[in-house]
Image (cartoon, coloured by chain):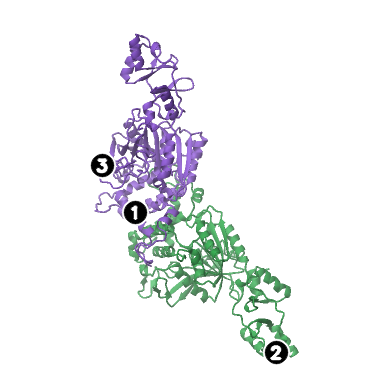
Chain colours: A green, B purple
Amino acid sequence: MIKGSVGTVTTQYYHHPSPLDLESGELLPSFTLAYETYGTLNREASNAILVCHALSGDAHAAGYRAGDDKPGWWDSVIGPGKAFDTDKYYVISSNVIGGCKGSTGPSSENPKTSEPYGTTFPVITIRDMVNAQKFLIEHLGINRLYAVAGGSMGGMQVLQWTVSWPDFASKAIVIAATAYSTPQQIAFNEVGRIAITSDPAWENGKYYHQKSSESNGPFRGLALARMVGHITYLSNESMHEKFGRALQDKDRIGYNFSTDFAVESYLHHQGDTFTQRFDANSYLYITKAIDYFDLTKDDSLAKGLAGVHAAFLVISVSSDWLYPPYQSQEIVSALTTNDREVRYSEIRSNFGHDAFLLESGQINYLISQFLRRTVVGDVMIKDVPTIEEGATTAVTARRLINLEVNHLPVLSGSDQLVGIVTSWDIAKAVARNFLWLDEIMSKDVITTVPDELIESAAKKMEEHSISALPVVDADQHLIGLITSDAISILIGRGNS
Amino acid sequence: MIKGSVGTVTTQYYHHPSPLDLESGELLPSFTLAYETYGTLNREASNAILVCHALSGDAHAAGYRAGDDKPGWWDSVIGPGKAFDTDKYYVISSNVIGGCKGSTGPSSENPKTSEPYGTTFPVITIRDMVNAQKFLIEHLGINRLYAVAGGSMGGMQVLQWTVSWPDFASKAIVIAATAYSTPQQIAFNEVGRIAITSDPAWENGKYYHQKSSESNGPFRGLALARMVGHITYLSNESMHEKFGRALQDKDRIGYNFSTDFAVESYLHHQGDTFTQRFDANSYLYITKAIDYFDLTKDDSLAKGLAGVHAAFLVISVSSDWLYPPYQSQEIVSALTTNDREVRYSEIRSNFGHDAFLLESGQINYLISQFLRRTVVGDVMIKDVPTIEEGATTAVTARRLINLEVNHLPVLSGSDQLVGIVTSWDIAKAVARNFLWLDEIMSKDVITTVPDELIESAAKKMEEHSISALPVVDADQHLIGLITSDAISILIGRGNS
């Protein structure tokens, strides 16, 4: 295994056999999502992080698939010791519906006709993408995400997650994104779509019958769309550094319409290779989803984000002119207005929009700092099994065994935490012949609160040699439990 | 006549029957330039200003052509009382070769084949455009331009004028331009070209046989190229103000691929109307000329501009991201390094690149201030007829009459200015029977120097009731002459 890499990975597929309600009112009869996972889900299923990809991304975010010579698209930040540390977290990367990378999209077969959907595929939105992902996450046995993260369109999915299910993800990381598409962004997307649909080989989206050894379908139009897109992903500065006015394979300018400059050759290459790996109709659908994205409500982003609960890390890139820093600042401002926890950083970089994939040093640092600052509320188990204080030791013992837990918080008639009981206490009762729970439970219970940093909670457990802490609110009502196992992994002591 | 307008204008055509040497080494067998003129050329031909247009511009810069309901492209700054004040200046607007607006370009007939040139038209450069214009200017009887001005590609032509003929234009006004195309600019142009050449209707440039009532040739590709271009001409802010996320003719988003947003509809319209007025091959040739434009020498713009003599006004636009202010600042910096006179202003505007056409208030102010600050050297007549101090009054009189001048500076044997003689002095000689020039000429000659402001020179003439001032260098050698007629027009007293 390469150091710091998740190693060899395999893309998996989640099939959802029943219909998905779409924002448009249409139904998608069934769908498949391609996904990959890295790291191990802990017993409490509390260390899962979902990463969401950009326009042309896929499920393959890290490591190497058999035969690959290039790693996944966010390999720089996913892996042992990296920001999304697979020694601590269970990282899930899900492809989006509408795409063409193993998930259901316009190039998929319509089960009703056994033909590719083409433009009969229903128009999907970022909300629909996220709805589909939620089924996958729950299928993986996860009822709460520790974090959801993504750049560009991935960042839009992150925002949508926090709006659609405010309590599902504890942390949200939004990079080089926006809470709504601007007319300039829509304009660039529309140019890409016109490039595709103006290509006679598009055939109104019914080009899948075309077969060729190289490209099929409207590859000229798709290449052109990608060229436009690619210009917007780079900054003026980075193009300068990368190409300047260097000529391509010639000593002097040609005074003809062959390729003169290196930058032209680069764009042609980007356009051409894209047609080998992306479906033109998917490009139409996904750009449309991006255009539709708008989390403002009554023209106010603060209103649109009023319901979110996650703690946010928002990152922008100084030279990103496609999703400029002011759009990230608007998100920050709306969250602050709603008194939500938010950190903001503008990365200094010349790479333009693509910096979210390239500035691995800065991104790793910011994300690991953010994830590290975890509070008890982020990782506690909710719906903790409890027992009433009047119980017998026999009832207590059966409850422990049946639920396969080691700790049972003991509640009073008014639901206040009055003690905690463990299997060790049961042993004590047997030894000393105690019949009542009240005689064996620990009454001076060490507790914690949701806002306590997990580092501090971990220290308490260490000092008192206990392996779980009940989490209580201001009235001593039990609201959760954290265990030393879960915490030690999160704060990086799992491997020490 | 509309107040402040040049009124009705007619486009004229200059035909150059002999070959034009092109930068590529090719020859253009002959060429035509469409042009318009506004205002009146003064007797000394010293008040001519050439304005140069941008990519898709034409000769029609001001006023109304018969049947037009819209004025020329720079009507906001050309006309009586405007920055390019047609009461003072003779303004010439010349179309470029390579274009399709009456000047020779790829859609013109190749005289050798009687077919349209198409892609057999030689590749032209900004230098070639300017070379062709110089023939026109000289044809109009002008040996020196008072100023040359333009925005965008027009600004490139201005810079090229000052480099190609350092002494031909006294003043140069460069707006929203650059001294070399950057890779990002080349990339956008290349996308436009690929859009055109990928359109099957382009037919390798031989599409002129196609006839239709609406558009012909590769109109889809050309529209797409224009759409991309148009995005680069507007700023993110101005698109926001203009469109926001407003929907086009609908109350809710359509969840289909019809036009949803007003910005899309606007772009379609811009693209479509462009195909009615522009030739696709011209788009290829002119964008290529822009790409090739690079006035740096050994990677140094200071070296590239070392030879220029004109006084410069450089204007950038705060929100112009196609030709950002830093590129104007590079021009200023290079000129300053060479100790050239240069003024720089960054217009505060949200209009983006198009501000050079739209911010008429700021542009009018900056240009009139700049043009007003004229020095004697800018407007003096060179090659002034003179007479030697030993001449007779009879010889002097014949010389005045034959040359049709009112003043003759008198030079010593060592070519120093020793006096001035006028027809009035001849009258005096006749009256008093003086035979020698020495007896009648004024010996205490009031003179001026090239750096004196014309306002100051005008004041001298007024105070001394004289109608011409010899211009001398530090050694009292005559280098020119200015007359009150020429000056009074320039400083705005011609109409008072």
The answer to which of A57 and A429 lies nearer the viewer is: A429
Which quadrant of the rendered structure holds the N terminus of chain B?
Answer: top left
Marks 2 and 3, how far apart at CA: 111 Å
Q: Using the image, name the chain to which the residue with label 2 belongs.
A: A
Q: In the image, is A92 to the left or to the right of B204?
A: right
Neighbour tally class for label 1: few under 14, some 14-19, many 20 plus, Cα within 10 Å: many
Mark 3 falls on what kind of element?
loop
Residue A436, numbered circle? 2
Q: Please state which amino acid type lies under the numbered disc 3.
A: Thr
Q: Please state which amino acid type lies under the numbered disc 2.
A: Trp
Residue B271, numbered circle? 1
Mark 3 or mark 1: whose residue is earlier in sequence: 3
For the point 73% across and 75% down, the residue is A464
Q: Please, which residue is most extreme toward the right here?
A: A432
On screen, residue A352 above or below A373? above
Q: Are marks 3 and 1 in contact (CB under 8 Å)?
A: no
Q: Are marks 2 and 1 on the same chain?
A: no
Residue B113, numbered circle? 3
Q: Please state which amino acid type lies under the numbered disc 1.
A: Gly
Residue A415 x %, y %: 63, 83
Neighbour tally class for label 2: few under 14, some 14-19, many 20 plus, Cα within 10 Å: some
Neighbour tally class for label 3: few under 14, some 14-19, many 20 plus, Cα within 10 Å: few
For the point 47% across and 42% down, the residue is B345
